[in-house]
Amino acid sequence: MSYKVTAPLVIIAHEDGKTGDWYGYAGAIVPGGYNDKRCKVLAKEGFLEVVKADPEPAKEPTSVEDILGAVGDDKAKATEALEIEKAGKNRPTLVAKLEAIVSAS
């Protein structure tokens, strides 16, 4: 379970009892290894809030079909994708399709 600091400052002892305390300012996410019991108390008192794990980052489209799907018929997106493709893999099939989108009236 992850926690986000909602108070101006919280101090949480490390679970091992030896490592130094963690000082977290508003908006910080409490790192793993800090006293979960203390975090639960601080959350109950309103100093922390429980946050869900970050969702997996969106995957950049890499296949020809994915890129064309992301571009659709948007000329600006096609132009940007075309520049990226020419500087990178420079796949003739994708380049031709992107150029057709860019030059469409």
Image: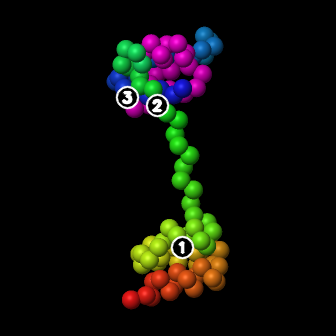
Outermost residue to the top:
17
Earlier residue among tags 2 and 3: 3
Q: Locate the N terminus and report the quarter of the image it occupies.
A: top right
Name which residue type carries label 2.
Val
Q: Locate the C terminus and report the quarter of the image it occupies.
A: bottom left
What residue did someone put label 3 on? Answer: 26
Tags 1 and 2 touching, CB below 8 Å: no
Residue 11: x percent and y percent? Answer: 45, 17
Residue 88: x percent and y percent? Answer: 62, 73
- The span from disc 3 to disc 1 (Cα, nearest Å) is 42 Å
Query: Does residue 62 show up magenta in the picture?
Result: no
Asked where in the image residue 77 lies, by quadrant, the reply is bottom left
Name which residue type carries label 3.
Ala
Image disc number at residue 49: none
Asked where in the image residue 16 lies, by quadrant, the reply is top right
Q: Does 20 appear above or below 69?
A: above
Earlier residue among tags 3 and 1: 3
Q: Residue at x 46, y 31 (%)?
A: 51
Residue 89: x percent and y percent? Answer: 65, 74
Q: Residue at x 52, y 40 (%)?
A: 54
Q: Is residue 84 visible?
A: no
Q: Observer-nearest residue: 38 or 63?
A: 63
Label 2 Cα neighbours within 10 Å, binned few <14 / some 14-19 / many ≥20: few
Residue 95: x percent and y percent? Answer: 58, 82
What residue did someone put label 2 on? Answer: 51
Q: Which residues are magenta?
A: 21-42
Q: Secondary structure at mark 3?
A: loop
What residue did someone put label 1 on? Answer: 68
Q: Residue at x 45, y 83 (%)?
A: 102
